[in-house]
Amino acid sequence: MRRTSFPSDCEETAMASVIIIGGGPAGLSAAIYAARAGMETTVFYQNGGALEKTDKIENYFGFAAPISGADLLARGRAQAERLGVRLVHAEVTGVEYAENGFAVKTTSETFPVRAVLLATGAPRAVPKIPGIQALEGRGVSYCAVCDAFFYRGRPVAVLGQGDYALEEARTLLPVAGSVTLLTNGAPIPAALPDGLAADTRSVAAVGGADKVAQIEFQSGEPLPVDGLFIAYGTAGSADFARKLGAQIDGNRIVTDEKGKTAVPGLFAAGDCTGGLLQIAKAVHDGAEAAMSAVQYLRA
């Protein structure tokens, strides 16, 4: 694993920083509070989530006239940058334990950090493929780090097409008997890891009576497997939290009232923690979680 420090022009010390994953209202609110508390703060984001797609907001305090989600998001980003927050448009593929804290992995680099705050919003939908939900916990998994051990020497598949799916496959390759990447009709990614097979056929169903037995395609012979790992789209807050051992309730990250998870140094805010899925709640959560992270870093 390659460890990369932040550029010196924004570096206090790499181990005295907080990384926020998610650039919506919860993440930006957290960044603003952390930066104002004197912390080196970096936000990794891919998009503005649900807020960016909202046409008109009429129920957020302080705006007499409606404002679009994109405009509100732009104001939040400008405010964060003015306070010295580093905004990085990049996909985070994993968060792992490392010396003195965590290692946040993007598609190109790995960043060491003492505190991580998850704020990527509500989890994405599970692919609507028959058999997936019925066989969850019985061969269908969402966490290679958590469950690879159970498939030692056995055939498994990873459903997905992007960097997150490839990262899950890399975790499985040294353990499983065979690993097949199912792209479900999408092209095969470039530079597949050694030993990873790929199948572009459209998936029709996940077969098995009381546990996963095979992947059924729209055409052709089925693929016998003992396990299927779902890695659709990009990794979200619940995925990262689950792999680090934080408590998860469904797809909601369990925190206390201050945004702390059960994992020291790991915090969460916004829609990924459940409750009222509103901007006002996300902004409040971000502030609470950021101040908890600041207290942790100063301890």
Image (spheres, rainbow, N blue to C red):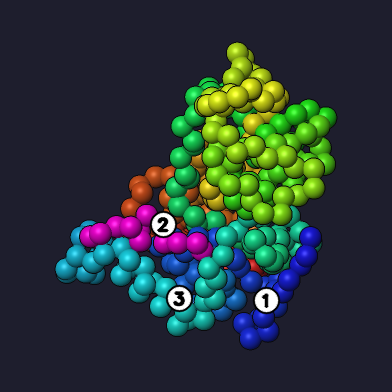
The N terminus - image quarter: bottom right
> Is 233 in the magenta?
no
Measuring 64% from the left and 71% from the top, which residue is drawn there? Answer: 17
In the visual, does 288 lie left or right of 68?
A: right
Count of numbered circles in the view:
3
In the visual, does 173 lie left or right of 136?
A: right
In the visual, does 197 lie left or right of 290?
A: right
> Is 48 in the magenta?
yes
The residue indicated by pointer 3 is 80
- Of residues 141 and 182, the one nearer the viewer is 182
Q: Are marks 3 and 1 in contact (CB under 8 Å)?
A: no
Measuring 29% from the left and 57% from the top, which residue is drawn there? Answer: 54
Secondary structure under tag 2 reads: helix
Measuring 67% from the left and 80% from the top, which residue is drawn there? Answer: 7
| Marked residue nearer the N-terminal end (3 or 1) | 1
Q: Is residue 182 above or below residue 163?
A: above
Residue 49 is tagged as 2
- Residue type marked 2: Gly
Q: Rounded to the nearest whole Å, what is the CA distance between mark 3 and mark 1? A: 18 Å
Specify whether residue 145 is in view: no
Q: Rounded to the nearest whole Å, what is the CA distance between mark 1 and mark 2? A: 26 Å
Secondary structure under tag 1 reads: loop
Image coordinates of residue 169 in percent, x first then y, are 71, 43
- Residue type marked 1: Phe
The residue indicated by pointer 1 is 6
* Magenta extent: 45-56
